Amino acid sequence: MAPRNFRRRNIILVTAMFLVIAAFAVWAIPNRQISAAKRAIASRRFDLARHRLDGYPSWGFEPQMVTFLHARINRLIGDSQAANRSLDQAEADGFDADAVARERNLIAAQNGDVIRLNDKLDRYLRDAPSDRSAIMEAFTVGYLGMARVDEAQTLIDFWIADDQPDARAHYWKGVLEDLKRNPDAALDQYAIAAQIDPDMIDAVIRQAERSVEQDRLDDSLVCYHNANTAMPDRIDIRLSIADVLWRMDRRSEAIEWYADIAKEDARIYRAASRLGEYFTADRNAAKVVEFVTPALTHYPDDVAMNSQLAIALDELGQREASRERLECFISGNAALDRLRYEATDTHRLGDYRELIRIADAYVRFDWPESQTWLLRAIRAQPQRADAYQRIAEFHRRGGSRIEAAQQQRIADSLRQKNQSH
């Protein structure tokens, strides 16, 4: 009987331990995903935060929190409509009504309605201390967006004075110093933010950008490499590494980076044009053909690249193909001459349709110059969605995914707004 009782006790003990472990897993796994998402949001790693939330198990106990955090991410990236839709869903699913109402007001504050909501700030900070940073950030962004520099300064200084160092406070202090045209102070604040939270890649990149502006290229390169280690899928970061290496006269290293980018995506104009320029000067016709030919499928009338390819094909003895590229170069160059003449007509510079027409022509013949004309078109008529749509495409082809997404959201928002009217 004793051995049998012993075995029974062991079975009961093992079963109990298994149940405890299972119960802990049921609680810990979903909680870990939510905690990781919150950390990613605090670090402005919004794609990573979405990934964490997407990994939340279907049997978790807080699906409403997942929906609420999706709303917060959408707010922080500037997609107010998506944020409000997620809040509608979270509220319908029974999430804390006060938190939902507060988040709606944070959307409004972030979008510039800070004066109306200013009297709620103290109450929000008192009622939701765990959400203190999110509240401060929304109001700070609202003040900065409305160019109310003094109010933003006061709030950020109050935020920084907290006992717990917060990378977000220093990040937005850096943005404020940028607006005040204090690049040295901005660089210091971005560096502090990155030191507090090395995962805040936005701060690391801004630190790198300000370092480039101050010709501190070694420092910039370190920052960009750190950012690339954290986010190797960001083509714009790799482009920046290549650009810095080029400025440092480390041309062969830069070319390796440009080449990897061009092989990954032939639409990235900056990489293809730099490779064409380098290998043309190096008289390496085969490399010019290798990199410029795929790019010309996206920019068939580009003057510079047609010239580069014409020279390379001629050196390789492909006379007929070279002649075709030369004809494209000549016709494109003539078109550019006409565009430059039209640019001197001040009457055209205030005409939105003319500005868009000139921008579209530059897209064909001299792609980098198109941005200048698109920005002029936006200044002429800032409520037109099509210019923002074109700017979004410009940034996509430039490898700047974040800027492209921001401009695309503006275009979509203006399009919906115009349709509603």
Image (cartoon, grey):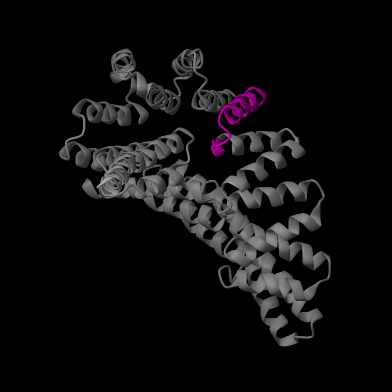
Q: Is residue 102 left or right of residue 300?
A: left
* Vertical placement of residue 181 versus 296, above or below: above
Magenta stretch, overall SS: helix
Q: Is residue 232 visible?
A: yes
Residue 298 included in the magenta stretch of the image: no
Residue 65 picture location, percent across and down: 28, 37
Q: Which residues are magenta?
A: 181-202
Residue 270 picture location, percent across and down: 64, 57
For this rendering, which residue is in front, 15 or 239?
15
Quarter of the image for residue 203 reads top right
Q: Is residue 271 left or right of residue 65?
A: right
Q: Is residue 343 visible?
A: no
* Vertical placement of residue 94 versus 367, above or below: above
* Vertical placement of residue 74 versus 267, above or below: above
Residue name at image x 59 percent, y 50 percent:
236
Q: Quadrant of the C terminus?
A: top left
Quarter of the image for residue 413 reads top left
Q: Residue furthest front?
A: 1
Quarter of the image for residue 313 reads bottom right
For this rendering, which residue is in front, 225 or 78?
225
Q: Total of numbered circles in the picture?
A: 0
Q: Is residue 50 left or right of residue 364?
A: left
Residue 216 picture location, percent across and down: 75, 35
For this rendering, which residue is in front, 320 or 200?
200
Residue 201 included in the magenta stretch of the image: yes
Residue 398 picture location, percent across and down: 57, 55
Q: Is residue 293 left or right of residue 59?
A: right
Residue name at image x 41 percent, y 24 percent:
133
